[in-house]
Structures are given as C-alpha cells and as structure tokens.
Image (spheres, grey):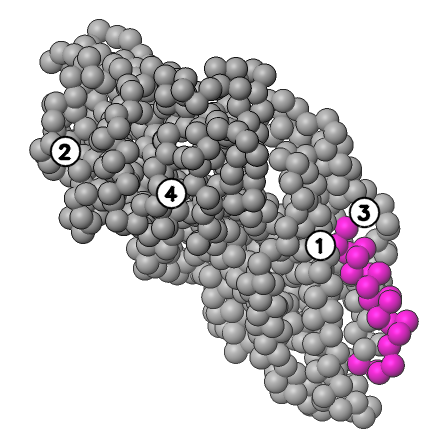
Amino acid sequence: MIRFGLRLAVAGGREALTRLLVIAAAVAIGSGLLLTTLAGVNAVNAQLTRYASMYPNASTGDADPLWWSTRHDYFHGKQIIRIDVAATGPSAPTPVGVPITPGPGEYYASPAFRDLLAAQPADQLGDRYPGRDLGTVGPAALTSPDTLLVIAGGTPDQVAKLPTAKQVTSVGDTPALPETTVNLILGVIAGGLLFPVLIFIGTATRLSAARREQRFAAMRLVGATPRQIAMVAAVEATAAAIAGTAVGFGLFYAFRDPLASIPFTGMPFYPNDMSLGVLNVLLVALGVPAGAAVAAQVSLRRVRISPLGVTRRVTPRAPRAYRLIPALLGVAVLFFAIGFKPETSDGQTAIFLPALLLIMAGLVFAGPWLTMVGARILARYANRPATLIAARRLADNPKAGFRAISGIMLALFVTSVAVGVITTIVANRGPAPIGSIEAGQVSLYLPDDAPAAPDTLFTGLRSINGVRSATAVRENPDRMNASEPGLIACTDIPSAYGRCAEGATVAEVATGLIPFRESASSARVWPAASVPLGDLHQLPVMSIVVDTDGSAAAIERTRTVLEIAFPTFWTGPNVPGDFESDFANTLRGWEQLANVVIIASLALGGCSLAVSVIGGLTERRRPFSLLRLSGAPVRVLRRVVALESAVPMLAVAAVAIGMGLLAAHLFLRAQMDYRLIAPEPRFYVIVVVGLATCLGVIASTLPLLERITGPETARSE
C-alpha cells in the first residue's frame, strides 16, 4: 500500500501533482519559519546565558579566589560593561573570553569597544580606561557582536573596595535567569508565530480533502479496508510533508546568517547562536510529517464511518455563546489583579501568564461563534446576491471559515499585547527629550564615604567647552524633616533649575536639582533652608550637577573628568535617560520582533487563506458551475469567494487587536499602575498593509474560478 500511495501521489494526474507541490511548498515555508523561531529562542537563551556570566555568584572552593566587580558606564546612550578582576593566587579562575586574567594597569576589550575607543577622542572616552591593551575579549563572553565590554585588572585591595565586589572560585556557570517580563514577551511572541505556522501546515495538508474523500470512498466501495485507505492517505500527505520539510531546512540554513544580523532583540545575534538542538531537529523533521499524516487521518473521518459517508453532508451544529466564557474569565483575572497583585515575581507570573493564555485559548474557542454572529449580521443586511450567499455559507459552517484565520487572530492578539506594553513602558521610562535641560545634564551622586570634591574639579569642569555651570549640592543635615534632601547657595542655582524663595540665602533642593519624575523648570521656587550660608561649605557634597549645552562632546568630556576624579563608583556619572535610553532600545528591539511576527503571521495567514480558497474552489467546482449555467456572472462568484475569506479575517483582526490592547491595559494597570498609551501609527500601518497583502493573495487565486467552473464540469461530474 505504501508504493500504491506514492504512485497515486506522484502519478495521479495533474491535479494530484499540483496538490503535492502546493503542500510541499506550504510545508517548506512553514517548517522554515518554525526552525527560525526555534533557533531564535535558542539564540536569545544563549545571549542571556553569556550575560549571566558577567555577573557570577560569590563562591568558595579549593582554588584561589578571584576578586570580581561588574560596573556600568555609558557613552552616547550606549551601555558599557566594565568588569574589574584581581587574582589572589595562581589557581584563581580566568574570566570567560580571555586567555589570562589581566593584571594591574591591563585590560581586554570587546571588538566593538576597541573600535569605539579608536574612533573617539581620548578626552571623551579613552582616558577613562588607562593602561595596557592586552587584546580582544572572545565571543564566549559577549552577548552580541555589538557588546561594549572591558575586563580590567587591578590589585586585590583595589578591586575589593569596588561596589558589588565579591570573591569567586568559578566563572561561567551562573544560570541564566531572565526577568519575568522578558520571559513573558519572548514566550508570547514565539507562540504568536508558532500557531500560524502550524495552522498553515495543517491547512496545506488538508488541501482538496473533499476530493480525496470521494476517491477514497470509491476505493472502499470496491473492497479497500479502512486501514488500507488510512495508509494511502498517510503516505500521500507524508510524502509531500517530507519533501517540504527538507526544503524548509535548506531555507533556514541559507538565510540563517542574514537573519542573525537583524537586531530583533535590540542587538544582533552571532550566527552560531541561531543553532538547532537535536530535540529541535527531531521535533520538526518528525513532527511536521507526523502532523501531516494526522491531518490526513482526520480528513477521513466520514469515510471510516461508511464509504457513503462523504455524501451525507449536513449543516454542522451552530456554535453556542458559552464559547466566550474562557476569554471572559481571562479578562476577569486581569481585572482582579489590579487590586490584588502578588508581591513576588513568581506570584505575578502565576497570575498574569495563565490569564493571557486563557484569553488566547478563549479567542480560538470563541472564534467560530464570533464568525457565525458576524455572518448572520452580514446576511441580515445583505443587499446583493454575492453577499447573501457568502454570509449564508459562513453561518452554516463557521468552524471551517474560522479555521484558516485562527492563526491571524492569535498572532494579532499576542503582538498587540506586546506592542501595547512596550509602547507604554517606553513612553513612561524613555530618555529625556532631545533639547531639554535634562538631556544636557550630567550628575554624579556621591556616597557618604566619598572623598571630598576639590575646588579644582569644578574649575576644570567649567573650562570644558559647552559646560554652562558646575554646581555642588550638599547634604541636608535635617533630611528627615526637610522637604528636599540637598542644600545649595541661592547664588549657585543655575537659572534653568529655578530660584530661591524671597529673602533666602540657602535653599533646599533635589539631589539632581530636578525632583523625581518631574522636569526642570526655571519658574520653580525652592524652599528656604534653616542652615546659615556660612556653615554650608562645611557640609559634605552629596552630588555634583553639571549643566551642558547638550552636545555629545561636552557630555562625554564632563563624564570623563568626573570618572577620573571618582574612579570607584558603581555607575559612572549619570545623564538623565542613560539607563532609560538603553532600556528603551532593548524594548524597541522586542517591539521590532513583535512587528516581524505580525508581518510573518499575516503572510502565513494570507497563504493559509489562499490554500483554503483553492481547496474550497476545487471542492465546489460543480455547484459554482451550476450557478454559472443558471446565469450567475463570474464576477458575482468571485465576490462570493472574496467575501467568504475577507469578512472573517477583517472581523477577527479587529477583535484580536481590541482584546490585545485591553489585556495590555489591564496588565499595565495591575503591574505598573500605568495607563495604556496607544501604539505608534507604524503599528497600524503594518497591520493594514499586512491585511491588504492577505487580500491581495486571496485575489490572486480568483482567476482559477473561471477556469475550473466551465460547463464541462457540470456535465462530466
């Protein structure tokens, strides 16, 4: 029966060969995207693992300990990771990515950081990292080719005094523990792409299912057993799926390097990171053909009952409104979380993730009911024959109408959630606006044990081209009862940051001269302090605030001077928005990945619809031929087919985006007390263009209608 099934699949005429090629092409695209998704997840995990190796846990053992301190710096808004190390003996571990541990006055730098050092003036960047360059940090220690990393050596006494200094006896075995939000976004995005891929493959393998059922029913009538029929069907579907899967592997490896260079997560991957494990290969190589065989078996359910079962087609039972319950329960859980958010990350994950998964499953479960309701409304207000025919057919079998577009619904829902959350977080925590006072401010917060800031430091800062003022904010001795923690002489307050109250000589001010989550204002009036002006200079300096013209050169020169004066701080001098800019860029990378998912899922949805339309036309060629013989113009029949595909797709898209943005709003209210900020116009442009492309793909199949519904079809069948 295997040879007979292969013969039917390959030598069964032009229709059988066309079906085989279409299924193979669909499976190739689907399996290629499936492999890319799995490899992308592996690449992100590899990035997170290497990132974790930069932050080893303190450990003890037989080896000599290695002093380790990881700090952060910034340059033009890009984060620089600085690792200071000091070996305490010959058996101390070596940092990942370098051949030996650097000694005092030596350092290794990543390739991207070496290029940056060579391209920038020393007084803006290089002077922060004096010493002898030993070479390049290898890829094993870098999350991305663009990572800016420096591993600097020091003496044990020097490194032990640095922030977060710890002793480690092993390096590189810190487990990667991504944040809850990253896990959620990554899982949702991967699921948003996987579902359309699997639906596309399933739709393709069911191509011309009704025609094959008729052929298999005829074989049953001449004596074939159900087991033999099942074997033939499985061989047909599996042969096409195996060929398509093989081509899919070829497509993945052909485009892996270009895909790795795209910064989907805010930074490009190493090509080798986009690798496939044995389980991934087996999952696709065996799972896709097996899924195709299962789909073929499912399509034969009527033939198993009786060889005449395919002729007994009745209208399926209409779906009921109870299908809305799972989605409504998911929304209710998110509403509940607004007032009862768990305190721990694990507890929050246990609330939010099941709620989102419940909404996703609920949308798929409710899809046929929504399709039926939309079709009945369309039929009620139909004023053309094509609209009425399309609406009646959708209402009679809404499950079939929804099946091909269920992937689009899931993809649009999960990406709407991701884009809504990301857009809102970036808007609330993004960098300072270009040209604002905040964007040009450089501030350094000094701990209690910091050395005194000499007057020559302020003289040097004020001499930098582009620096407007350099001011010391001193510690308020009565911080518990004061309105602000810092003190400053009224004559030292830059005009852009406000002024003193009338008659005051010393004012209480914010640490950085800008209150938390507020903007700088020249109209701000700072309250008077009770400390006399004569006693002010005896108080310790708690922060140094430098106001620049906002130029990159002035900011970086200022930062360099401050870092040289205070080299042992946890972070370098802060420009409001440094961390926020880096964080926003990372989130924009995830948003870009979500947009890629939208484009890919809509393309897959269009292909699924095209395959579904072709299959539907093939199965209904006789009814359409009879309609043409009765006088129906071809344009009316084309309109019927277009409406049957376009109406559910557009309705599902609107519901999915609306539910996605609602879920995002509830998540933001519960987790961060933010209100949803609408996605940028490009999100809607991508969705509209993608849906228009789907409609174009559907339209490309309509010329087939005229060719297969001629009078000879009605006469010969």
Name the N-terminal-most of marks 3 and 4: 3
Q: Is residue 271 above or below residue 88?
A: below
Residue on which the image places disc 4:
547
Which mark lies nearer to you, 3 or 4?
Answer: 4
Q: Give left or right: position of 7 versus 660.
A: left
The overriding secondary structure of the stretch rendered in magenta is: helix
How far is the residue under mark 2 from the one under mark 1?
Answer: 55 Å
Residue 165 lies left or right of residue 336; in this view the side is left
Task: Indicate the amino acid at tag 4.
Answer: Asp
Examine the rendering and report whether any part of residue 229 can be seen.
no
Pointer 2 or 4: first along the chain: 2
User: How far apart, in angstroms, are the residues tagged by discs 2 and 4?
Assistant: 26 Å
Q: Quadrant of residue 122?
A: top left
| Kind of residue indicated by mark 1 | Gly
Q: Give how far apart the Cα atoms at labels 4 and 1 are.
A: 45 Å
The answer to whether the residue labelled 2 contacts the one labelled 4, judged by CB atoms less than 8 Å apart, is no
Residue 336, how many percent across, how many down?
A: 76, 32
**Label of residue 323 in the image:** 3
Most distant residue in the right direction: 380
Q: Residue at x 50, y 73 (%)?
A: 17
Residue carrying label 1: 658
Q: Give the SS element for disc 2.
A: loop
Q: Secondary structure at mark 3?
A: helix
Residue at (66, 83) in percent of width and height: 705
Amino acid type of the residue tagged 3 in the rendering: Arg
Mark in the foreground, 3 or 2: 2
Is there CB contact under 8 Å for labels 3 and 4? no
Residue range corresponding to the magenta coloring: 366-386
Question: Residues at badges 3 and 2 in contact (C-beta under 8 Å)?
Answer: no
Q: Which mark is residue 130?
A: 2
State the quadrant of the C terminus.
bottom right
